[in-house]
Image (tube, rainbow, N blue to C red):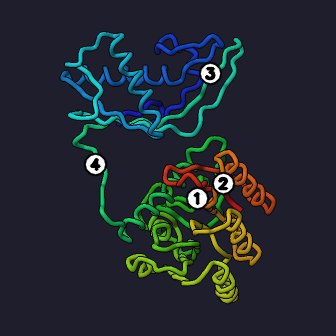
Amino acid sequence: IYVLSDDCEKMRINEALESSSNHNAGISDQGRISVLDSFTSRLYDIMTKMQKEKNHKLIFKVETFPAKLRRNVVANLFEILEKNSIPEEILDIGPSNHSHILSIIQLGRPTMKKYDNGKSAQISSFLVGIAPVQETVPPVSSTSDSIDDDVCRAYYKLEEAFERYSLSPNINSQTFITNVSLDGRKALHWPFPILKAGTKRKSTQQTHIIGVDCGSAPGGWTKYLKEQTVCTEIFSIDPGEMAKSISSLSGVNHLKMTAADAIPKISEILALRRKCDDCDGIAIWVSDMCVHELTKQVDIFLLAKNADIFRPGMAFVLTIKCNVGHAKDRFDDLTRNEVKRLEHVGAYGLKIIHLFSNRNGERTVMGFI
């Protein structure tokens, strides 16, 4: 995979664009540097370098997110190829008979930065990957959705949320105090420290760590908590059916009821345990439950907080859902209102993320409390 950055994760076009003349970047009358021109110029540099290394014809198929980005990227690449008189027999862009897939994902909206010289520049972040076509996986098509498909989609939705949070700017590592040892390392100083810090190996911790998956059916988020976090026990709340492969996992308790009914039950269970051991509450709360009202997700979360079942510094992931017609800007404003409600009760490290896995009427809110 070729990644356009030194940190091997993402490329951010910012101050580097001041030397835009080296990248054929266009500059408007207002002195604004064209992000897309500079970006595609850098793609061209990588593609030609690859062609020289391979010493044979390369055809690239361009795939982008958002999809509307593809047309402009392809047009700019064609223009650069023509300008540099690159023959089709050496390097080309095409939707079929391609040798490589060029994948581009734009992270968030471009922002503007002003410079001391009076110019301004758009700053955008992109994830870019290039792979031989034989090493890529074609899109999976199915005539029916199985429960396993739903589990898989949900699993990777939560995985994306944790990954995106860790890449977010201005997010300081939070401290999640436990006595848990992860392969000899304390579970501290990790953007979401309850994660196994990049390892899929089981930890040898003795501390009992509880997670809650609210709206869990068919079980994708529960599976992720079980496999990729240090949770030893998970309360999966949903009146619907869980996949048997998930509900039968050790440490998974399916509470087949609504969240409003489950919270008092969990409170009773924890109250009994506190008399016998050092149980200090829920360590992580994730919720992707279906709600009819936009405020309901936070309502349930606050209901749980008022039941005193959270441990200090608990991590949480909430999907804010809008099931009625709202313009995007209006929905974003309503989501920010929900974040203010969380801040009001002491939540911190808050981040609103529009996951690639989210629908248009969904935003993911993550943080600690």
Image point (58%, 69%), residue name? 289
Q: Amino acid at mark 2?
A: Gln
- Is residue 291 depicted above or below 278 in this figure? above
* Residue at horizontal 23 percent and vertical 26 percent from the top: 58
Give residue 138's mark: 4
User: Answer yes or no: do the residues labelled 2 and 1 have beta carbons within 8 Å?
Assistant: yes
Q: Residues within 10 Å of mark 3 (few under 14, many from 20)?
A: many
Q: Earlier in the sequence, mark 2 or mark 1?
A: 2
Q: Give how far apart the Cα atoms at labels 4 and 3 are.
A: 37 Å
Residue that label 2 marks: 174
Work out whether mark 1 precedes mark 4 in sequence or the reverse, and give the earlier one. 4
Badge 1: few (under 14), some or many (20 or more) residues near its Cα, within 10 Å?
many
Q: Residue at x 50, y 24 (%)?
A: 36
Q: Quadrant of the C terminus?
A: bottom right
> CA separation, marks 3 and 1?
35 Å
Residue 275 higher or lower than 94, as above or below: below
Q: Which residue is mark 3?
A: 121
Q: Nearer the viewer, mark 1 or mark 4?
A: 4
Task: Identify the image quadrant of the N terminus.
Answer: top left
**Front position among marks 3 and 1:** 3
Q: Position of residue 255 (x, y in %)?
A: 55, 83
Distance from disc 1 to disc 4, alpha carbons, whole Å, reads: 34 Å
Dot 4 alpha-carbon crowd within 10 angstroms: few under 14, some 14 to 19, many 20 or more: few
